[in-house]
């Protein structure tokens, strides 16, 4: 963790990094890939540069930024008394570099524009080789929120950043699709017991297993906090988030003791319920619909041979069936049993369906285990309405 900068030998990549570092050192902003989502970076020690981030994103002035470092030495340089609190030792050893953000007492080196007046600074040590090489080339910590316009789904492709911010920022580095696809987990280990303020790429189950984190609580699942609700410091609590233009409707299972087991893709399951809802909305004059699907079952090759195969924008395929309707566009997120796949595709799917100009996007919910907790956290913030189906188990 003290000398972790990956060797970037490819000349073109090297050139792009030098250009980006030059722009950042001059106090400008750059869109950059990370393993979670694309970030909009600026020099974290420069208050004017930080203001450019808020302006480009149209971000509320009271929503603090995460600072990204590429070594523990750099981390210490921005902390109060240059000390890393002991409570984080095992978390750092286990999950850094990676999609985990920790709250620290800050030093006065970090401008107020970044922390928005908080006594703490949120810091992340990313694992993406481009992000780390860029921080190291700048030789400064980089402040970076997600690189979307405020309120929109976070970008997981460079083209998403361009869709939101073209003309407002001088450069985006294209690093392909982000591997996690959902933001970092934000942990406050300074409070007792420790708290997950935002679920993300490192799961609650993983954090709970780390020494000193056995009692970790998740906001909304284990506790709510009136003061936190009011303060803008807790990730995404105060503002509308992750919302495309279309109305988003979550269709999820509620676990009950004695209701019948529904089939995920059968007529009483999520998909069947969505098709019924679409019929109703059509009668109300709505025309185009999108479905983010998680209840797909994989098709067998022999069945596939007999029917037309639909290839989806994210490369997955499924069989064309009788219900195919050009005004109902399906985007498979992956199966609910593999929440990490759903996490990777969620924001891309929301953006894709919005581009298709649908009136309404239905999302098939998944269980809140592992990455499912972060997925459902984002979906709930995006959704304006929820349809609950009873089931004795998640399918
Ligand atoms: O994965 C990520 O974390 C991405 C990539 C680019 O690193 N960044 C990201 O930043 O998601 P952003 O700004 O979209 O979300 C950061 C969240 C904000 O909602 C903010 O409220 C919270 O972190 N935050 C920042 N500083 C904080 C602090 N001192 N105390 C509590 N929450 C803080
Ligand atoms: Mg964000």
Image (spheres, rainbow, N blue to C red):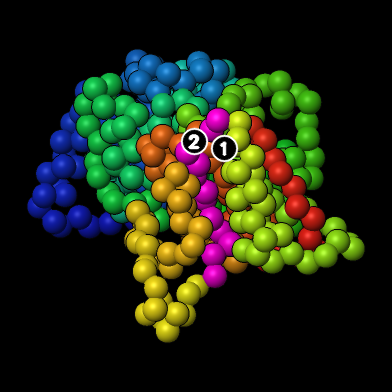
- Lateral position of residue 24 relative to residue 143, left or right: left
**Quarter occupied by residue 351:** top left
Q: Is the magenta stretch mostly helix, strand or loop?
A: loop
- Lateral position of residue 384 relative to residue 167, left or right: right
Residue 381 appears at what percent x and percent y? 61, 35
Q: Is residue 178 above or below residue 283?
A: below
68 within the magenta span? no
Q: Name the residue under label 1.
A: 282
| Residue at position x 78%, y 31% in the image | 225
Separation of residues labelled 2 and 1 (CA atoms): 6 Å
- Lateral position of residue 140 relative to residue 61, left or right: left
| Residue at position x 31%, y 27% in the image | 165
296 within the magenta span? yes
| Residue at position x 27%, y 49% in the image | 175
| Secondary element at tag 1 | helix
The disc, 2 or 1, on the residue closer to the chain's N-terminal end is 1
Residue 116 appears at what percent x and percent y? 54, 19
The answer to whether mark 2 and mark 1 are in CB contact below 8 A is yes
| Secondary element at tag 2 | loop
Residue 254 appears at what percent x and percent y? 78, 53
* Magenta stretch in the rendered image: 285-297
Crowd band around label 2 with a 10 angstrom C-alpha radius: few (<14), some (14–19), many (20+): some
Look at the image and tell me whether residue 165 can be seen.
yes
Q: Residue 186 carries which label?
A: none
Look at the image and tell me whether residue 199 can be seen.
no
Q: Name the residue under label 2.
A: 287
């Amino acid at each position: 963790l003290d000398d972790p900068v990956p060797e970037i030998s490819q000349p073109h990549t090297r050139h792009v990094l030098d250009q980006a570092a030059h722009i950042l050192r001059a106090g400008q902003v750059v869109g950059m890939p990370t393993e979670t989502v694309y970030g909009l970076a600026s020099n974290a020690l420069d208050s004017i540069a930080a203001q450019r981030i808020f302006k480009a994103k149209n971000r509320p002035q009271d929503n603090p930024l995460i600072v990204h470092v590429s070594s523990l030495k750099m981390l210490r340089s921005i902390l109060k008394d240059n000390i890393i609190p002991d409570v984080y030792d095992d978390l750092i050893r286990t999950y850094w570099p990676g999609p985990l953000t920790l709250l620290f007492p800050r030093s006065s080196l970090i401008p107020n524009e970044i922390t928005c007046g908080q006594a703490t600074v949120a810091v992340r040590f990313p694992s993406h080789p481009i992000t780390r090489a860029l921080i190291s080339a700048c030789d400064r910590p980089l402040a970076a929120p997600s690189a979307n316009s405020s309120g929109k789904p976070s970008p997981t492709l460079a083209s998403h950043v361009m869709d939101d911010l073209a003309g407002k920022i001088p450069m985006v580095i294209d690093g392909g699709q982000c591997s996690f696809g959902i933001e970092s987990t934000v942990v406050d280990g300074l409070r007792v017991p420790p708290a997950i303020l935002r679920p993300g790429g490192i799961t609650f189950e993983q954090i709970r297993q780390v020494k000193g984190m056995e009692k970790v609580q998740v906001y909304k699942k284990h506790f709510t906090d009136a003061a936190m609700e009011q303060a803008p410091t807790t990730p995404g609590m105060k503002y509308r988030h992750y919302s495309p233009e279309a109305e988003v409707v979550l269709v999820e299972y509620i676990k009950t003791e004695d209701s019948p087991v529904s089939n995920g893709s059968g007529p009483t399951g999520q998909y069947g319920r969505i098709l019924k809802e679409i019929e109703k909305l059509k009668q109300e004059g709505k025309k185009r619909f999108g479905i983010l699907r998680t209840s797909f079952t994989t098709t067998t090759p022999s069945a596939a041979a007999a029917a037309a195969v639909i290839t989806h924008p994210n490369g997955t395929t499924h069989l064309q069936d009788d219900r195919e309707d050009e005004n109902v566009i399906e985007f498979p997120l992956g199966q609910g049993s593999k929440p990490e796949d759903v996490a990777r595709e969620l924001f891309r799917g929301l953006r894709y369906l919005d581009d298709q100009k649908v009136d309404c996007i239905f999302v098939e919910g998944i269980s809140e285990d592992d990455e499912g907790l972060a997925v459902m956290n984002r979906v709930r913030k995006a959704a304006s309405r929820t349809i609950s189906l009873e089931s004795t188990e998640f399918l």
